Image: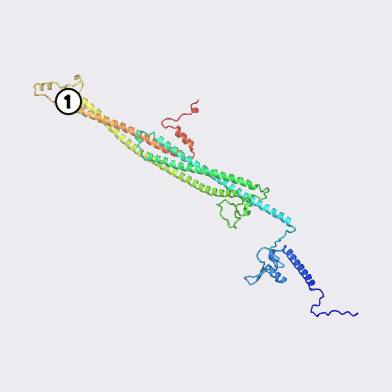
Amino acid sequence: MRVLAPPVERSQDTRIGAPAWREAAQALSRTAHILTDRCGQEAVTMWQPKDSVLDPNVAHHLGRAAYIQPWRFRVEMLKGGGTVEKPPPGEGVTLWKGKMKPPAWYARLPLPLHRKARALQTTEVVHAHARGARLTAARLGRAQHQINGRVRQLLRQREVTDHRLSEVRKGLLINQQSVKLRGYRPKSEKIPDKADSMLTWEKEELKSMKRKMEKDMEKSEVLLKTLASCRDTLNFCFKERLQAVDLMNQPLDKVLEQAGRHSWVNLSRAPTPRTQGQKTPPPDPVGTYTPECALALNEAKRLLVESKDTLVEMAKNVVDVQEQQLQISDRVCASLAQKASETLELKERLTMTLGLMRGTIHRCTKYNQEMYTTHGLIKGPLSKVYLETGEKLDRPLVRMYQRHVGTQLPEAARLAQGTDKLQRHITHLEKNLDELLATHKNLTWGLNCKTIGHEVDGSVVRLRLRQRQPHVCYEQAQRLVNDWDPRTPPPRSKSSTDP
């Protein structure tokens, strides 16, 4: 039996498979291809930086060439006309043979040496903390050393100021001795003069200098206590920082030298021409440079500046007080010496006047004796038996002439008148002589007073020059004021009275 086949339509597609079947297979293939590309790209991307991913719209070789172009060496022209190839700037590994410098590579996933890398990172963190703690400890130790040095300087300056204060107090005692010694002058020499005014002025000036020195001592004492407290704080922070550093492979001075900073506190050091060292890190409560350490270092820096100014001021005050005290003492000694010279001049004048008066008294006394002799000769003897015949008033010649009443001779009356006149002259001369003797006595007493005043002023000058010597201490001057009395001899010691 003959079978007839259906007629086949003529078409361009000669494939036998159904389009749906073929499309499903192609879709599955495309999905697998896309998944393969995506997974491969993601797998590669995990091991390379983000900027290394190529543009899918650019050919692979073109994208790679554009990507590695910045890595290649650059050709630069020299002044002489030649050329030189230099690697590009930035971080990376320089490949001199290939003339390329790829940048540093950062992975996104942990590498096989991740554990060792984390251990190294931990070690670096620990070492960095130890270095920071060691550096902070070095800074604290250096600050403590500088504070100790400033404390020693302040103590030495306090000794100098205390010595000058004792000299000022000794000057007050010398002034008291001078006033006390001048108080033993006679009353006529105690008339207030410029020497007394100079002693009063010296006392006021010495009191002012004493208050100034005492104020410096009080200020330095407060500053010394503050420095000691700051030193204790620095020592506490220093020991606390050292607890994080068990093994010190180099001294603290070497640490500061490596940091490029000789000190973070010392401001008197001249700047070096080297590059600046490490800057002071900000305070971190959980780091090596804590706020307590920062506060201690800032306090030390402030105290060093303040103590430096205080030391300069104290030294200047000591020099000024020493010069002023010496000038005042010289002026007082000069005034006392001038007063002694004036007293000596008056003493010489009184001595000359006293000598002239002594001669006058001698002449008046001799003349008075002659007047007494003349008076006795004129008055005559006390008894008639001692008279000569020519001296009697009843001698024969007179008795014969006076027989009549009107013939009386004036001899007796004239003798009486002369005797009375001579007696009055003798009385006046004795009165003048008494006045001369009284004036001579007063001059002698005034001369003795002037002598005592001159000796007292000279003794005061010598006492002041001797007591202001450096080897005379305050206690010796104090014992002299309390125990010595110029009017009484010094007490003898028991050793001198013992046999």
Say few, some or many: other residues with alpha carbon within 10 Å of mark 1 (under 14 / 14 to 19 / 20 or more).
some
Name the image quarter holding residue 443. top left
Image coordinates of residue 470 in percent, x first then y, are: 48, 40
Name the image quarter holding residue 103. bottom right
In the image, is 94 to the left or to the right of 484? Answer: right
Q: Is residue 178 visible?
A: yes
354 up-or-down from 237: above or below: above
The residue to which callout 1 is attached is 416
Q: Residue furthest front?
A: 1
Tell which of 157 and 38 is nearer to you: 38
Tell which of 119 and 166 is nearer to you: 119
Q: Residue furthest top?
A: 385
Tell which of 406 and 483 is nearer to you: 483
Which residue appears at 48% of the width and 35% of the height?
Answer: 476
Tally of numbered tags: 1
Which quarter of the rendered picture does the N terminus lie within? bottom right
228 up-or-down from 188: above or below: below
Image coordinates of residue 62 in percent, x first then y, are: 71, 71
Q: Secondary structure at mark 1?
A: helix
Q: Disc 1 marks which amino acid?
A: Ala
Image coordinates of residue 28 in percent, x first then y, are: 78, 68
Q: According to the image, what is the colour scheme of the structure?
A: rainbow
In the image, is 300 to the left or to the right of 414? Answer: right
